[in-house]
Image (cartoon, rainbow, N blue to C red):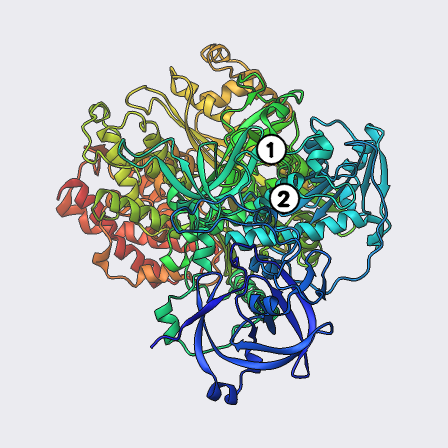
Amino acid sequence: MEPPVMGVVEGVAHEGARSRLFYKHGKVSGSKIDFLIDSGASHNFLGSRFLDASVKSSCDECMVELAGGQRMKVHGPIVLAVDLGFWIGNVEFYIGPIRMDAILGWKWLKMVNPKIDWQKGLMETRPEGKEICTLENVEEVVPELDGKNQSVAASEHELTHMPMQRDCETCVVAKIKRRPARRLEKDVSALSFNDEVGIDLVEPGRNVKSVDGSKFILTHIDRATGWVTLAGLRAKTHTAVADAWKSVQAGRGWPKVLRTDDGNEFKGDVGRLVREHLIKHEVGIPYRPNSHAEQERFHHTLNQGIRANLVQAGLGKRWFMHAAQHFAFMTNRLHVGRKSGKTPFELRHGEKWSPRNLSLPFGCKVVYKDDQPDNKYAPRGKVGILVGVGEHPMAILVLPRDDWTSETPKVIRTQDFKAFTHEFPLKGIEREVVSLSQQEELPEVDEPSAVEAVQDLDRRIDALRAREAELEKEIEALKVRVVDEERAAGTGGPVTIPQLNLTTLLKTGAALASEQGRAAMEKEVKSMLKFGVWDESPLTLEEARRQPGARFVRTHFIFGLKFAEMPEEFRKVKCRLVAGGNRIWGSDGAATNDIFDYETPAGLSAIRMIIAVAAILGLQIVSFDISSAYLHADLSGPPTFAYLPREICDSKDTVVRLRKALYGLPRSGSDFSQDARRRLQKFQWKLVHGEKNVYVRRNAASSSVALLALYVDDGLLACREEERPGIIEELKQEFLIEKAPELLTEGGSLRFLGTSISLKNGSVSLANQEYQDVVIREFEQDIRRVLRAVKSPSEKLDGEEVLNYQVIWKTLKVREHVGRLMWLARTVRPDIAYAVGMIARYVDKWNVAAERLLVRVVQYLKTPREALEYHVLGNLKEGIRGVNILGYTDADFAGCPESRVSTSGRATYLVAGDYKYLVDWSSRKQRFVSSSTSESELAALEETVQLSLFPALSFLRSIRDGEFSVILMCDNQAVMRAIEMGYSPKLHHMAITRATDLAWLHQVCEKQKLVKLAFGFEYKTLESSMMKDCSRSVMISDLRNVCHCRFVWPCAKVKGRPKLLDSFLTRPPGHFPDTWPAVVASCGTNQNLWWKFVLLEKFVLPSLLERARTKGIKGRRGKLVPRNFQVKVEEEVRANRIKRELVSWIEAVVGRLGLDLRERHASVLCERISVWSVFKKAAGV
């Protein structure tokens, strides 16, 4: 059977009187304890420390109902002796798990009938004869709660929780403190409002950030009235403080006196404002809080009020700014000053505040009107909690129920609401009390006191901080391990999974819905705040428009999935805050055009020049990454204000001024380049002539040279080994380089701009095989078909197919695939440049011919290829002076079947010793239609000189002063004669139609001797493949252009017996075709087979063709056919004679090359190619 309920305790009114509390020291049975005199308690109670076995066995159990409606089990009654000093006697107690040592309730008050002054804390016995208990200052009566009418106005204490009341659980939990010490106060009142003000900062704590982004609170106190104004800051800087102070003073004017402490945040811009407006600045004495006592005391009160509001509302620490603003609003209107006896509102406005409907406690339940219901029958009201109030106009801030647990909550401002001042929904959720049936089943435990609760909380906090420190150590150890692994990867260590750093775009909504996306966004915002990209204090739109030349731009987040080609566990979500630079408008709303010096990143040809020079001079190659590169530079030009995304700032009427070069702004790249130039010039880096972000540093003492290229945030360095540590340290002084730089060593590799740069067997190679595999795989997935490999990258476009738009794969992602192929063609695959260029012409008018050519190029990519290689010399006697420039140029006259426009092709090499280094190539459509082959060849030649040869010459002259040999190979003698004369009547019109000046070429080539023209059809190699298709139906006259690989890819000089030649000689005879056209067609552009046919094409074929001309062989139907062919009579004699001549000729050539080739090898070579079978197949015998 349930024990009977015995009265109430702790704060519920007894017989209509409001509960009052009073503390008194005394003794119970000789033990010193603190008594709580509670007029609201019906009986007397002792804490569980007095409950022992004898009491449990001798006393009965009963239930006591608490003020909150809960029930508590107690034992009693028990009579004990009580000594209060002014009164001694026996008192009947009930013992239970209460928070206080002892409570003397209404039963004791009625028996003793003391005289109590609750405010002054005085208690004494009354004269004899008084029978009625009358308590001074307890005449206030509250209406009886009948359960039907629960709408009661909130008390002033619930609004501000001032002064602290020990019967208020919120006050006890939020404001418990040490015993106060004696304090001396000084009158520092001012004459009138806004004459003297004091400002200071309150820091909520480490890693505490409000939902509006604030990390600090600026407190502004008027000394005359005590009026408090608060403002949130995102950084503790003098700029942010100055902007916040200006916003507070708006509408008031500037004060006469400003009081602050000696912090650096009150200097700089704050000092400038003080001087400009002739304000007296009184600075407190460092480490002497009493010189700034009033402000510091208010901080103590403010922190108590914030804690009380947060505890009452059940909200977390990230709502501290809203709680602070609510506390300041209510304090200005309700808190009565001890000296003046008036509130700050009365002192400022001369009248009492009329609360109207704004006397609302923080965190109370609010039902507000929904202006956009889902349908006509949806409820018009929504439930939320109050997080702020405003008076002009009268409105409140509401946190809707849907956003109570949101990471990015949205606060509603409304005037249409109904408040329930005694209901705190979130407090009920966080402090949910178990039901009576559940409580009865729980074991009996003592309820801890408030002090014990706070001590337990402190212990938990200390434990969490210790755990946080351990986690930080683990993270640092993990970073070190990752850096070591990256360094091992850069120095030849094992790499299990190739990383292409392939990034794909993600939708913003989908990214923000994931935890990784939100974490990436927070990291990006922290980086922005770290670099001070914008001012911490936002401005209203009207304030920003007053700035001369103000410009406005919107910002948004872009999310990407990094390492998209890798498995799921390796992928990483990246976030970047960018500006919408495509539309920037002024104060009048009209679009603006920004004028600034245009800058470009380092070009791909310049980067290859650096790698080639490093290979020639034996320099070390290092790549590094600059974190948040653009944010290093200040934003120049007129003031630019940005609308931040709603994930950062929900207000549509506020903007922030940009201070750094934010991504997306047109001038950000220029600002970063100029800023980087200023930083690098401190260490004697100079720009390479003709380049914007390529630098050279020459050391005259050691005759050394260092090269540096910046491609936005990616950097490439080439220098001597002994200079590398010093240069890296200099770069780290000026730029934020968080990731360890990668060093290219023997057997290792590194990645730069997605290209793999590796060093193996004395050669630096450039390849992008992993990215190429991704291109092939995704293309096959798009067309849902596995392609076979082919030997040639292109084929002749058919004019009828070009006009046929009925393609097979209508859903093909043409732009995506063509863009990837163009990147391959620009970086490491010059052999597909012509074909990809032809495809790109038809992206906007896709047709069957372009589709077939795209499929063929992807098929060709499946054929194995050798990488672009640069042989490492390192011991060139002449150094960079021994390097020359060799260029090739050619044109495909009227190669486009649709427009009859020609195509220009060019290739540029650095030549050092016996090796050639390909550094630049291009295949591009000419702008005008040519009327002749000479016209198209001349246009291609001029383009090669201007865009390829001269930039390479400028690069070499920036490294070392002097003259360098520049040779340009051309196969059109008419063009060469025209340049030699400086005039041609047939090409004179080009000065008008193309602005091509023969006189300029004559000046460059003949007078200044900057470029030497050389004729050579047989040397025409790479440029031919860039402007002509390399199909199987290639004629004998084009065999040289297809097979001449020596000038396409530089090959290392072979010492001793060539292994490829041995493998060629040991293959079975039937492995190779019998005819030369078939040999060439099967070879195609496969570099693995090209080397095997170098000797055949270079030496055997010219001899064969020469013998065919002398013996009367002529062409018929594209085949070689002998004249007066007599098979039966001359077959054996002719075959044996040709074989003997070829053997002796090959031996002589191989001997001049220094190769070890015996007679049997030459004989076997002739046997394998079956020279005589060429004639038999050609003749159809």
Residues 991 and 757: in front is 757
Which image quarter: residue 1078? top left
Residues 198 and 160: in front is 160
Tag in front: 2 or 1: 1
Indicate whether 535 appears above or below 361: above
Q: Position of residue 110 (x, y in %)?
A: 59, 66
- Name the residue: 53% across, 53% down: 312
Circle number at residue 354: 1
* The N terminus - image quarter: bottom left
- Name the residue: 85% across, 29% down: 278
Disc 1: CA contacts within 10 A as few (<14), some (14-19) or many (>=20): few
Could one spot residue 868 in this view of the protein?
Answer: no
Residues 428 and 1157: in front is 428
Q: Earlier in the sequence, mark 2 or mark 1?
A: 2
Q: Position of residue 405 (x, y in %)?
A: 43, 51
Is 894 left, or right, of 580 in this rendering?
Answer: left
Circle number at residue 232: none
Identify residue type, mark 1.
Ser
Whether residues under marks 2 and 1 lie with C-beta atoms below 8 angstroms apart, the answer is no
Residue topped by disc 2: 234
Q: Position of residue 796 (x, y in %)?
A: 26, 31
Identify residue type, mark 2.
Arg
